[in-house]
Amino acid sequence: MRKALFVGAMAVATLLGIGIAPAMAGTGNVYFASCATNDGGACAGYVLTGTNFRFVHAATVLRDPPLFSAITNGVGTQVGLKSKTTGNTWDAIMGVSDTTTTGTGYSPESLVYHNGSILAVGPNAVFCPGGVNCSSIIGNFAVGDTVNQSVFFNQASGIVTFQALASNGDLYKAFFPVGIGVLFGQARVEQGFGTFSHPAANTELFQNKNASVTTYSGVRSGLTGKFTTHPEKATSTGTGAGTLQAFPNALGNSSSGGSQFKVFFQHV
């Protein structure tokens, strides 16, 4: 059986502490979240609102999980698209994760939530070592690989496609029909973890590169554009009143619309 996306964090709740985002371009209010209750188990990164998104992507360098064994029992990274339609909320997530003790490699997983509950795990998923000979036997991604993760919604067919492509050519892909007419008003690039103990100094978790989104109108950009970009910080309670656990730094590479950032564990 494949590992859950994040250790102890296969959640059914939506982002905590999130208010209504302003429907304009620019930097929005900070979102606070808990990995224990967030969809997919990720809770630090960037969340985009203010328009509808059909594609989200990020390339993430997979660091050696035992580096974080004194901080947490598992780490992971994900991208996702979420709709906000009352009574018909979809959340489509592509993520990879590993424990900090076994060293078995990062497991890819795609998740589909509907109205806050997991509807599908790895739907129609295959793994293709080196990009060939695809099968339902799901492999792992190696430490040190750069993994390009993406979620794409085909507006014409109503199918969401998930993909994770490693720098060595290993490929995970899956798909699920959510139906036409879904409005994915939120895109996310996030990191997550399981248990938490403060490190003695701020500690880098993951570096994200070439992050991008595409709107329903076909405009592609980095994580800043004609929408609102919210930094997402992890806290002990999922609210601003909780103790800070992890946070993203400022978006870099402004020439491409903010395409890279790092997430750090907060020191004691």
Image: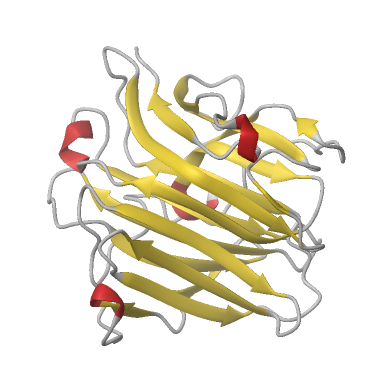
**From the viewer's perspective, is residue 26 above or below residue 54?**
above
Work out which quarter of the rendered image holds the C terminus and state it: top left
**From the viewer's perspective, is residue 144 above or below residue 233?**
below
Q: Position of residue 249 (x, y in %)?
A: 51, 24
Res. 141 image quadrant: bottom left
Give the residue drawn at x 31%, y 50%: 7
Most foreground residue, 96 or 71:
96
Q: Position of residue 213 (x, y in %)?
A: 65, 53
Work out which quarter of the rendered image holds the N terminus and state it: bottom left
Q: Which colour scheme appears in the figure?
A: secondary structure
Q: Position of residue 74 (x, y in %)?
A: 28, 44
* Badge count: 0
Q: Is residue 19 left or right of residue 244?
A: right
**From the viewer's perspective, is residue 102 above or below residue 199?**
below
**From the viewer's perspective, is residue 225 above or below residue 85?**
above
The answer to whether residue 17 shows anywhere in this view is no
Most foreground residue, 129 or 264:
129
Most foreground residue, 24 or 198:
24
Q: Is residue 214 left or right of residue 20?
A: left
Q: Position of residue 22 (x, y in %)?
A: 85, 36
Give the residue drawn at x 66%, y 71%: 153
Give the residue drawn at x 50%, y 28%: 248
Res. 245 image quadrant: top left
The answer to whether residue 218 shows anywhere in this view is yes
Q: Residue furthest right?
A: 23
